[in-house]
Image (cartoon, rainbow, N blue to C red):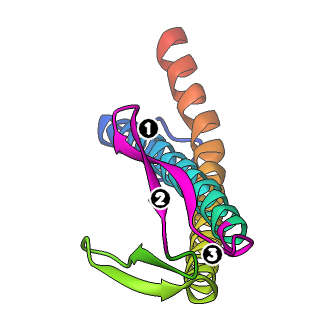
Amino acid sequence: MAQSSAKPTPQDVNRLVAEWQYLQSLAEALRQRIDLALTAINEIEGTIQAIEELGKVTEEVEALFMLGANAYARGKITDTKKILVNVGANVLVEKSLEDAKRFFEARIDALKRLVAETQQQLASVTARLSKLEPELRKIAESQAGG
């Protein structure tokens, strides 16, 4: 708007409404990104815990293997010192338990950085929304009363 005391033009109102809608959508997308990253962190922490438990085993061990959609098969883990790790693009790499643990810890660190950066972006978006809302409320009241 040109001046705060001047009556806003329809273009000003449209611009403010469009910006508010965009920022609302962006805030929701950022919240979803944070939720997904936190879920991934929890899953990876569970994987690290399973790797640590496997490291305590000294001989062949029976386990349940997920087949998908709540279906499991019984099987034996014959090599308890190495596992296959999906490193991306469905590429599996055999790693020692320690190397696998380090790999997953690095993934957690990267996800935590992503969460922190995204939270900063969300804070900026939220701050801008909190500045826009009084402006939009003022316009709505002036149009309703005028």
Q: Tell me the residue that label 1 is attached to.
A: 8
Spatial CA span between label 3 and label 2:
37 Å
Query: Magenta includes 127?
Result: no
Identify the secondary structure beneath mark 1. loop
Which label's residue is closer to the chain start, 3 or 2?
2
Residue 34: x percent and y percent? 57, 54
Segment tinted magenta in the rendering: 54-78
Q: Is residue 37 left or right of residue 93?
A: right
- Residue drawn at x 34%, y 33% as measured from the top left: 69
Q: Is residue 62 left or right of residue 17?
A: right
Q: Tell me the residue that label 2 is attached to.
A: 76
- Residue drawn at x 48%, y 42% as measured from the top left: 28
- Graded by Cα atoms within 10 Å as few (under 14), some (14 to 19) or many (20 or more), the crowding at tag 3 reads few
Residue 41: x percent and y percent? 61, 60
Residue type at numbered disc 2: Lys
Q: Could you say which quadrant of the image residue 14 lies in?
A: top left
Q: Could you say which quadrant of the image residue 86 lies in?
A: bottom left
Q: Could you say which quadrant of the image residue 123 lies in?
A: bottom right
Nearest to the observer: residue 50 or residue 132: 50
Identify the secondary structure beneath mark 2. strand
Q: Are marks 3 and 1 in contact (CB under 8 Å)?
A: no
Spatial CA span between label 2 and label 1:
72 Å
Q: Tell me the residue that label 3 is attached to.
A: 113
Residue 25: x percent and y percent? 41, 42
- Graded by Cα atoms within 10 Å as few (under 14), some (14 to 19) or many (20 or more), the crowding at tag 1 reads some
Which label's residue is closer to the chain start, 2 or 1?
1
Residue 128: x percent and y percent? 59, 52
